[in-house]
Amino acid sequence: QVQLVESGGGLVQAGGSLRLSCTASGRTLSDYVMGWFRQAPGKEREFVATITWDGDHTIYAASVKGRFTISRDNAENTVYLQMKSLKPDDTGVYYCAGGHWAAGLTDDPAEFRSWGQGTQVTVSS
């Protein structure tokens, strides 16, 4: 299984930007569809974005569409989540996840077998 490590979280004011990174090791990243999920305090984990193994297709949660961009660099074994126009509601722990490439564009966390430990994003008002 691939091991995933997130980085780039932090404290930012509303309207600001952050870029999260997810670095993979142990397996070739191009074997995986990759996703980002987040969990706010007291709430269930929710889908944020997914990108196919080749980077050609993406899907986003309605709450982040137009503000967040998921991308990947398979040569660097890294997936990114560029976040702009951040809102306090975006606060939470952000998780990177990997699933079998054949899963395609999915927002179902059950399709993702490998998860990182998460990185905290806090947006102040």
Image (tube, rainbow, N blue to C red):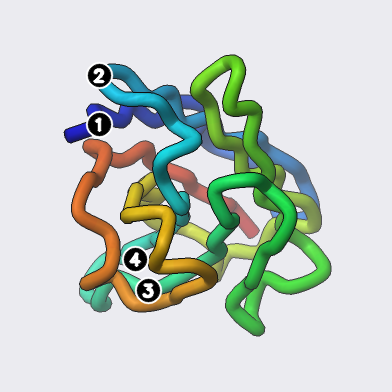
Q: For numbered disc 3, what is the local secondary structure?
A: strand
At label 3, which amino acid type do we have?
Glu
For disc 3, the marked residue is: 46
Label located before the other in sequence (4 or 3): 4
At label 1, which amino acid type do we have?
Val
Q: Residue at x 53, y 71 (%)?
A: 105
For disc 4, the marked residue is: 40
Relative image position of residue 2 (x, y in whole percent) = 25, 31
Quadrant containing the C terminus is bottom right
Distance from Cα at disc 2 to Cα at disc 3: 26 Å
Q: Is residue 61 above or below residue 97?
A: below
Do the residues under discs 2 and 3 have CB atoms within 8 angstroms? no
Q: Residue at x 59, y 56 (%)?
A: 51
Do the residues under discs 1 and 2 have CB atoms within 8 angstroms? yes
Relative image position of residue 77 (x, y in whole percent) = 50, 22
Label located before the other in sequence (2 or 3): 2
Relative image position of residue 16 (x, y in whole percent) = 77, 45
Residue 99 occupies quadrant: bottom left
Label located before the other in sequence (2 or 4): 2
Labels 4, 3: front one: 3
For disc 1, the marked residue is: 2
Relative image position of residue 53 (x, y in whole percent) = 54, 48
